[in-house]
Amino acid sequence: MFGKLSLAAIPFEDPIVMGAVVGSTLLGLAILALITYFRKWTCLWAEWLTSLDHKRIGIMYIILALVMLLRGIADASMMRSQQALALGTSSGYLPPDHFNQIFSAHGTIMIIFVAMPFLVGLLNIIVPLQIGARDVAFPFLNSASLWLTSAGAMLVMVSLGVGKFSKAGWSGYAPLTELQYSPDTGVDYWLWALQIAGVGSLMTSINFLVTILKMRAPGMTLMRMPIFVWTALCTAILMIFSFPVLTAALTMVTLDRYLDMHFFSNTLGGNMMMYANLFWIWGHPEVYIVILPAFGVFSEVAATFSGKRLFGYTSMVYATAAITILSFSVWVHHFFTMGAGPNVNLFFGIATMIIAVPTGVKIFNWLFTMYRGRVRITTPMLWTLGFITTFAVGGMTGVLLAAPPADFVLHNSLFLIAHFHNVLIPGALFGYFAGYSYWFPKAIGFPLDEKWGKRAFWCWLIGFYLAFIPLYILGFMGMPRRMAHYDNPAWQPYLLIAAAGTVVILVGILCQIIQLIVSIKQRQTTRDVTGDLWDGRTLEWATASPPAAYNFAKIPTVHDIDAFTDMKETGVAYRKPNQYQDIQMPRNTAHGLINGTLAFVFGFAMIWHIWWLAIASALGILFAIIARASDDDLHCMVPAAEVERIENARYQQLTAALNSAAGKPDTSGMFSAGGNHDK
């Protein structure tokens, strides 16, 4: 009845795993108890879990990313501490089997369940606001995408205590994922988590492509879109073209494992290297999928906190487009050593070097934006400055690895580990942290504490250099990646420094947790009633903080790249419309949550071969889709009178705040009705 599932699947004999399971369970029960104690279940269900509001969906994406970040960092800490200890006769504290699961889970979590939800969360919160839209093109699809991603993340978390996770690495190279070499459920957890989350990501990309192309405010041509929106558009295009390749590759691995086919076996016509090609045809665009939105964040932050227009807007757009196209022409540099021959390696090596050019254009644009600007050193700006200095090192090592002879020497060494962390941590994670601190007051209504934010930044930056610069040296010394034990005593001092760097990063995460707690406690005194805390330049700052469900009472008309700065300079930023109108908004629904829950059950049933449960959950998903498609009551109306009440309350708060700041009554008429755009 329960397929391969039994009590033997729970590793009671492993104190480390059981400690993590018990700790996670107790924490979850404590959260449920607090929700019950404060009687928040109704609010949680009605306003969050079933919400189709793009801003709330974005916040939930980011919460998911931050939770998974804690798991990913915990795995990284265990790897670094194990390697610091496992010299010679000491075997450390992690068995090799467990160590293999940890590095496989770490990569999967950080790429698929931290970077992806974080970037999609930021896109959800900001893109509709920046283009002057009231929501995304397909609100229900947005909700379904969130819960499918959450279902994939939940499968990874369940693997911690029920069965095992994959030991084949986050990339799942053949033949390690074949049944002959991985007969347990670990690879199946990896497969179904990626497949389910991948469907959610693909739906998200379609949603944002249509939103950006079809829902921009009047006057917002493509070349008036904020750079963050441009990076979102290019990211959506990359996802649409690359994720189906991953889906196809994983489907073939699934058929190999479940139906004894031989797509990637080394017998009966299988081709192991075909999997590597398919995976990295997705995998290298994925690097830019997670980095391009961060580049957009840095562009917004640099312009805002330099107090001037972004330098080289047009070149930034074309550089983003060039990266989007070139990212599909470099995947073979991940396996120069496969034996494709010098001509193939030469082509992909040159292509890899060329793709560094548009990235360099972006860095110089950010530097020239700051040049002669009135730079304010806020937390978002610190993350941006830390990125520019650190990413340059990662970029240079990437150009080095683009040379096939160098790659032959350094392939699968810790030099490679240092390189891609040197790209992804400052290039993606620092960008998400910059966006998190920059747009937090817009999404939540009050800013994050600057003092603790800056402490977190310095811990992350210092910890990063301590954790990864020694790995470059170890790579040159010949240390391979993924070693649970080693016999060369010359390596240990560098591994001890790397472990110390991990501790400093953990202190940085602790500072971020304290920052959030302090900010919540101070929220009544720091609340942003102006909606424009940073003196922003784009349309999201024209709304309240947090924005109303409908975002804009009247859709703005755009006349400039920096639309909101232009509106402030021409005196129309805060003018009331002559009259308000009813606004149609999507009605909340539980169908997205139901589909996500059933997808989790389906994945779990397929992993453990519980066929009746898999069939039942698949039918449940089908019935839920039919029920949603048959529902004609999809929208609700916000009456004009309610819109006027909300807007008047906002203007009263805004007037009081501006009068308090100026120390005099408002006589400017800035909140009068009507008004034309005069230049």
Image (cartoon, helix red, strand yellow):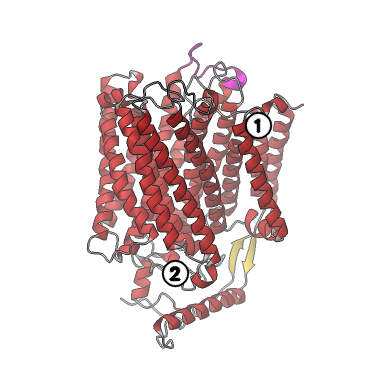
Q: Determine whether 313 is above or below 599 in the image.
A: below
Q: Quadrant of residue 44?
A: bottom right
Please state, as top left, top right, bottom left or bottom right, where the N terminus lies in the image: top right
Q: Is residue 319 magenta?
A: no
**What residue is disc 2 on?**
542
Q: Quadrant of residue 558?
A: bottom left
Please state, as top left, top right, bottom left or bottom right, where the C terminus lies in the image: bottom left
Residue visible at 42% across and 45% down in the picture: 504
Residue visible at 25% across and 32% down in the picture: 350
Residue visible at 36% across and 38% down in the picture: 468
The single residue placed furthest to the right in the displayed view is 1
Query: Could you say where residue 363 lies in the image, as x and y percent from the top left?
Result: 27, 50
What span is colored magenta in the figure? Answer: 257-271
Q: Quadrant of residue 83?
A: top left
**What residue is disc 1 on?**
162
Q: Is residue 262 magenta?
A: yes
Query: Could you say where residue 155 lies in the image, as x and y percent from the top left?
Result: 61, 36
What secondary structure is found at the residue carrying circle 1?
loop
